[in-house]
Amino acid sequence: MTRGTRGRAALIGTATVGLLLVAWEASVRLGDLPEFVLPSPSQVAAAAIDQAPSLGQHIATTATEAVLGLALGTALGWLLAVLASAVASVGHATRPVVLLSQTIPTVVLAPLMILWAGFGLTSKVVLVALTVFFPVLVAATAAIRNVDAEYSDTVAGLGGGRVHQLWLVRLPASIPGALAGLRIAATYAVGAAVVSEYLAGESGIGVFIQRSRKAYAVDQIFVGILLIALLSAVMVAAITLLRRVATPWQSAAAHH
Amino acid sequence: MDERVPALAAVMDVTARRADARAGSIPAPVLAVRDLRISFPAMSRGARDLEVLDGLDLEMGDGEFVAVLGPSGCGKSTLLRALGGLMDPRARVSGEIVVPRDGAGRRATAWMPQRDGLLPWRRALPNAMVGAIAAGIPGERALPRARRLFDEFGLGGFERAWPHELSGGMRQRLALLRTCLAERPVLLLDEPFGGLDPVTRRRMNAWLASVRLTERAADATTRDSTSLAAAPGSGVVLVTHDIDEAMMLADRILVLSDRPGRVVHEERVQAGTHERYDRAALLDALDC
């Protein structure tokens, strides 16, 4: 995209969101919907300002859970992908277990995690890590599998052994895939953290939403939803940035 | 090293062989292939096995540059992969391949693929260093040499470039530089300039020939050189389908038949003659 078309795309996107907000505000006011069914954007904004002092702590809790869980899940998924590509039997041994575990939606494991790891940070981090692990594993595995046989042949043809293959070819080849998986996983991560907070916890966006629900403060629920969206967006943006730093050969290619 | 072809008959110790030969004063080959047959099992039921090489013989003497010339698909690349220890494990191999080995029993060959094989995630200098890393050459020795070779190979100033930022000719030179940094005496070059346009390709050939000749001349004084075929027990096997390339670079040219490949013609440099090779004979052997 050239600079001009990119600017135009951003303009159209912003205008659409603005129009939707205006339509929402207008339909609530003109349609005379009660506030406990659908609050207007201005009411949500007012609620956000009202709750602002307490929101920081909730955001920090959820962000900590999501970031730690992402880091743990990504490290495990990536490690397993590289290991399974280097040692075939590791792949054979883990594949059925990993596939079976993926037939269980991770959020249904939340009660178990809380039973085993308590109400605190650990249970939530583990749950996020479980959610994140699979997409990273799949994307990194695909990236390693798709790497040109030419590269490993080149290394072998110069006298390189297994360790060289791993260090020179497989590991770097898996980075773009792992990061692509991480980017998808980042949006799941915040969701998984919030769901685990629904069940138990003292702070977090999930806790804030549950408390608002009990108080019938629909406008505050909307504030919570908005925060989840914002947090996910920030994380995706951070990963996009990380991608540029960690795979400079790819971002360099994009500039040409 | 990972030996991919257990089926290969005796890969022998060349030094012993050379000592024997020296006694009889016959120059022993550094690298030899005898009655090599390679076929691949049929991919689908009912189809016939794919015979790639059919009793191929090849010898490379000390310091010799041998070109293997043949039509596309005649099994040239398969031959080179067999020499470099890169055979597909599904291949059926019979015959004898004698490749020099170093003190640790590793192949003394460095293979350069048809496409350059540059790793997209490494800048130019680290890409060249792959040759040294894979061959187990310590960095403190390889790095100064790599920097010097960058200038000699016309790549000076591009040390930090990504492979995709280099032109086709530069990429091939970088790949060749990487192959040299492995410090293996025998180079196996698979159509090193195959992907280039004819003009660039001619330039590359002229350049390669000049590198080689100057290094040969310098060889007497310095062992540590750009040398493609200077160290003792060394040589080059080049695979190509380009007659001019073969004529320009090689001391000896072997012409292969269509698949399944075997040697149908051999040309040697005529010492003292102005014309290095009989071009008509080569064309005739290639059946064109």
Image (spheres, coloured by chain):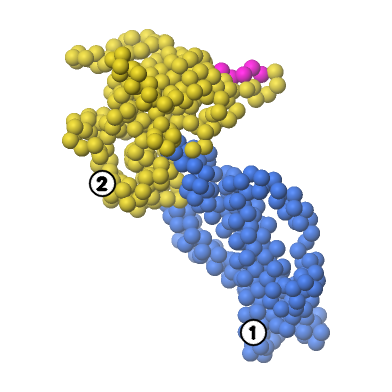
Chain colours: A blue, B yellow
Residue in front for this viewpoint, A206 or A228: A206
> Pointer 2: what residue?
B148
Kindly indicate the quadrant of the structure image that contains residue A20. bottom right
Residue B199 seen in render? no
* Observer-nearest of B246 and A169: A169
Residue at position x 24%, y 37% from top?
A: B223
Residue at label 1? A57
Does residue B48 show up magenta in the picture?
yes
Q: Is residue A155 left or right of residue A126?
A: left
Q: Is residue B186 above or below residue B171?
A: above
Name the side, left or right, on which B117 lies relative to A174.
left
Q: Position of residue A51 (x, y in %)?
A: 67, 88
Choose between B235 and B73: the one closer to the eye.
B235
Which chain contains the residue that carries disc 1? A
Residue A175 figure quarter? bottom right
Secondary element at tag 2? helix
Q: Is B55 placed above or below B220 here?
A: above
- Label 2 environment density (alpha carbons within 10 Å; few <14, some 14–19, many ≥20): some
Q: Chain of mark 2?
A: B
Which residue type carries mark 2? Arg
- Residue A24 pos. (x, y %): 71, 76
Q: Quick one: A132 or B269, which is closer to the camera?
A: B269
Task: Give the residue displayed 65% in from the left and 71% down from the top.
Answer: A66
Where is residue A252 drawn, in percent x and y? Answer: 43, 55
Residue at x 65%, y 52% (from the top left corner): A138
Q: Which stretch did the figure color magenta?
A: B47-53
